[in-house]
């Protein structure tokens, strides 16, 4: 069974928007895991925490969810710095078996965040209102959900901002340097721990904005982080660890493939996640360093 | 053996003493343990927590009256996180470590299905909790469900009856790729087939689906006259939003069917006017006069406010309270905790509950199902109190509770 061309094009369009959203929610992880090699499995939980904070800011101040997400970024930046400092003192500084212990630490952090959200908000879903939620732009038969357009736009802005920051600023270049050769950076008199702490802060701040996008795209509940662990790590690995442009490209590949499988009447929508991860495995087989990895 | 009078008297005295003080006497003085797992987190967590409030209300009330058989109830509950992988180990722990006397099933088909082999193997009474067709292959004779539908044919006749009245000839199916939704959808497909409807779209979506735009667009392209959806709460919300944005087409007469979550107050409040026109199943809506239900709901709503759960509690809480009422009647009726006697009592007697009288079939499902099919009408945004009064969910089926006729097509009904 085939798919008409107009539907295929719409599936690609929906996929591009969905892919932009996947890229946006993976951007923080691309910095923390891709560049810093920190196994931050709590990234989706931090993002969900960002969604709940956005929900509160919107409820209290009546602000737009994206603006609320931007306002939360400084607080999340400080939170990220504190989390990394604790992780460094407790695990990284002691050297051996950092990876396994680190994963356990971040799993624990994710659990604490989830339980904390349940205690504070209960298990009910939370949603926000905005003028672009529940509405679409119509072009003849084609209707594009505005919330997905907004998420895509914010994803592009976030990518451009992070790419420029990493390439044009001294701190950004230092973050890339610490990812490439930490001992060399140390020999040049820089403090890699402080740079990594700063970078982890940026990654966590990006998660706050991603959390705002998450609650725009759909309702959130405390356990939602589990849905995104696989997807965000897949995007970051497919991208090539630490590549911002690659993160967008990988997000688009996953989004488009998922959207086509969901819409195609003959493929079976249940296969959508499997197709995404099959692409990841294929990529790792052909190009282990990922799309944009070196 | 050399029996002396002293030895015989000593043995008799010891026997008398041990007969009056032993373990059994202590056990009878101990509590009646009732155990279960309940989804308190995960996709069914919101419903599970509200249901738990109702069960705890029943436990507290029975304990205030002196308990069951003169013993207090100890209620042991674990959170299964809506994770079917956890329920078999939780129920094994309840039986082997906590040594409970009676079991209640977790809310929902997905967490319940994996414990059925354990319960069947140990031949235990299990009070079902809104599960669908979890015994139709296991065929356990000590299963008693509180769900007011026995099977798909008694769950959805209202949906298909309305569709046929409107002259619908084609249907689209969208179902989550998990136990409950698949069971429900397969039953609904049989009803559609019997009604002579042509299936123009049939997809199962993965439960991790983020955005339903593609699926809804594909449904619109298939041009069905009925759209039947079987979904879990998170998906139901995302589907309703996507339908609002993408549209399902002018030709759709009825949209809805088996969407779990659209009965939960926080979700109804959040979706607001987006609910208008949807025809969906429900267990209870305001206006239905079951004896004692309004008094129960008023007590529940006070407690729900304190515990930050579903503030109205129409969907699950009354039916969970009914589980307690049925246990109480069976234990008092048999003066026993014997699983076989209790099952026999439940099979042969009509149970008096706040959700009406219940008589069970041999398979432990309701002999006279009362699943409602209702259409959302006149819902406005951000107003929880509107759902307290009759009329916001117009009952289309069954006839004895009917409060109005369906408004169609769906696009027209959305504006109502």
Image (cartoon, rainbow, N blue to C red):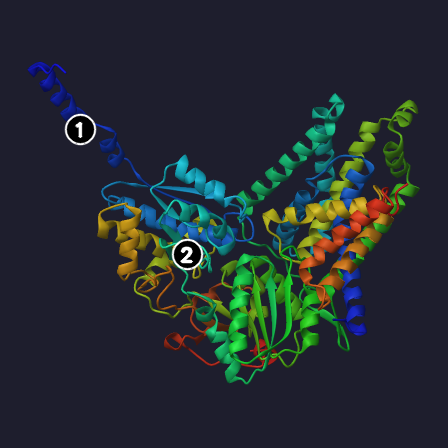
Q: How many marks?
A: 2
State which chain disc 2 sits on. Answer: B
Q: Residue at x 60, y 39 (%)?
A: A111
Residue at far left of view: B5
Q: Position of residue B98 (x, y in %)?
A: 39, 36
Look at the picture and state if B283 lies above or below B19: below
Q: Position of residue A94 (x, y in %)?
A: 74, 21
State which chain disc 1 sits on. Answer: B
Q: Residue at x 65, y 81 (%)?
A: B250
Q: Residue at x 55, y 66 (%)?
A: B185
Query: Crowdedness of circle 2 by 10 Å Cα count: few (<14), some, many (20+)?
Result: some
Numbered circle sitting on residue B139: 2
Residue at far front of view: B1
Residue B381 visible, this orientation: no
Q: Position of residue B321 (x, y in %)?
A: 36, 55
Q: Quadrant of the N terminus of chain A?
A: bottom right
Look at the picture and state if B228 lies above or below A188: below
Give SS at disc 2.
Answer: loop
- Tell me, yes or no, whether the two marked residues, 2 and 1, touch with CB atoms within 8 Å: no
Q: Position of residue B138 (x, y in %)?
A: 44, 54
Query: Crowdedness of circle 1 by 10 Å Cα count: few (<14), some, many (20+)?
Result: few
**On the image, numbered disc 1 is attached to which residue?**
B19
């Amino acid at each position: 069974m085939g798919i008409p061309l107009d539907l295929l094009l719409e599936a690609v369009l929906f996929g591009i928007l969905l892919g932009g959203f996947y890229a946006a929610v993976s951007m923080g992880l691309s910095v923390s895991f891709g560049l810093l090699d920190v196994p931050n499995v709590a990234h989706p939980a931090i993002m969900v925490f960002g969604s709940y904070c956005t929900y509160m800011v919107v409820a209290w101040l009546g602000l737009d969810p994206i603006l609320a997400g931007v306002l939360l970024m400084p607080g999340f930046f400080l939170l990220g710095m504190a989390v990394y400092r604790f992780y460094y003192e407790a695990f990284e500084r002691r050297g051996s078996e950092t990876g396994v212990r680190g994963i356990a630490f971040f799993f624990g952090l994710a659990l604490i965040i989830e339980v904390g959200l349940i205690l504070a908000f209960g298990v009910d879903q939370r949603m926000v209102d905005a003028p672009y939620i529940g509405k679409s732009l119509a072009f003849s038969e084609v209707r594009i959900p505005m919330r997905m357009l907004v998420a895509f736009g914010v994803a592009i802005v976030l990518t451009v901002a992070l790419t420029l920051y990493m390439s044009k600023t001294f701190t950004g270049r230092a973050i890339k340097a610490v990812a490439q050769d930490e001992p060399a950076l140390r020999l040049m008199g820089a403090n890699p721990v402080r740079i990594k702490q700063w970078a982890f802060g940026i990654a966590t701040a990006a998660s706050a904005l991603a959390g705002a996008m998450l609650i725009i795209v759909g309702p959130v509940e405390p356990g939602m982080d589990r849905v995104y662990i696989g997807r965000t790590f897949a995007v970051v690995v497919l991208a090539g660890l630490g590549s911002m442009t690659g993160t967008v490209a990988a997000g688009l590949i996953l989004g488009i493939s998922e959207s086509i499988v969901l819409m195609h009447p003959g493929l079976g929508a249940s296969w959508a996640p499997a197709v995404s991860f099959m692409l990841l495995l294929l990529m790792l087989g052909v190009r282990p360093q990922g799309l944009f990895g070196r | 053996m050399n029996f002396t009078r002293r030895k015989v008297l000593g043995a008799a005295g010891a026997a008398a003493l041990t007969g009056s003080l032993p373990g059994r006497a202590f056990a009878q003085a101990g509590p009646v343990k009732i155990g279960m797992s309940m989804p308190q987190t995960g996709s069914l967590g919101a419903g599970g927590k509200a249901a738990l409030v109702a069960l705890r209300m029943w436990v507290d009330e029975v304990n205030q009256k002196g308990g069951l058989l003169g013993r207090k109830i100890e209620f042991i509950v674990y959170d299964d996180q809506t994770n079917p992988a956890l329920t078999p180990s939780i129920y094994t722990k309840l039986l082997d470590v906590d040594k409970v006397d009676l079991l209640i099933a977790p809310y929902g088909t997905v967490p319940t299905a994996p414990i059925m082999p354990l319960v069947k193997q140990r031949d235990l009474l299990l009070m079902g909790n809104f599960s669908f067709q979890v015994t139709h292959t296991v065929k356990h004779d000590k299963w008693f469900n509180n769900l007011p539908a026995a099977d798909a044919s008694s769950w959805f006749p209202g949906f298909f009856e309305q569709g046929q009245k409107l002259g619908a000839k084609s249907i689209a199916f969208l179902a989550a790729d998990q136990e409950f939704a698949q069971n429900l959808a397969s039953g609904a497909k049989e009803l559609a087939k019997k009604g002579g409807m042509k299936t123009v779209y049939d997809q199962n979506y993965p439960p991790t689906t983020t955005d339903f735009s593609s699926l809804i667009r594909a449904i619109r392209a298939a041009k069905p006259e009925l759209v039947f959806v079987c979904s879990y709460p998170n998906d139901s919300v995302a589907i309703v939003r996507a339908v609002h944005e993408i549209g399902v087409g002018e030709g759709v007469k009825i949209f809805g069917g088996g969407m779990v979550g659209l009965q939960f107050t926080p979700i109804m409040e959040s979706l607001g006017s987006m609910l208008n026109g949807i025809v969906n199943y429900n267990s209870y809506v305001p206006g239905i006069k079951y004896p004692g239900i309004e008094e129960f709901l008023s007590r529940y709503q006070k407690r729900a406010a304190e515990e930050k759960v579903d503030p109205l509690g129409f969907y699950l809480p009354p039916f969970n309270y009914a589980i307690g009422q049925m246990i109480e009647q069976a234990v008092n009726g048999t003066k026993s905790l014997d699983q076989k006697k209790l099952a026999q009592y439940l099979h042969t007697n009509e149970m008096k509950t706040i959700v009406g009288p219940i008589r069970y079939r041999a398979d432990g499902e309701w002999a006279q199902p009362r699943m409602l099919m209702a259409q959302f009408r006149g819902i406005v945004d951000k107003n929880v109190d509107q759902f307290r009064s009759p009329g916001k969910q117009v009952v289309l089926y069954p006839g004895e509770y009917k409060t109005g006729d369906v408004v169609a097509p769906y696009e027209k009904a959305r504006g109502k």
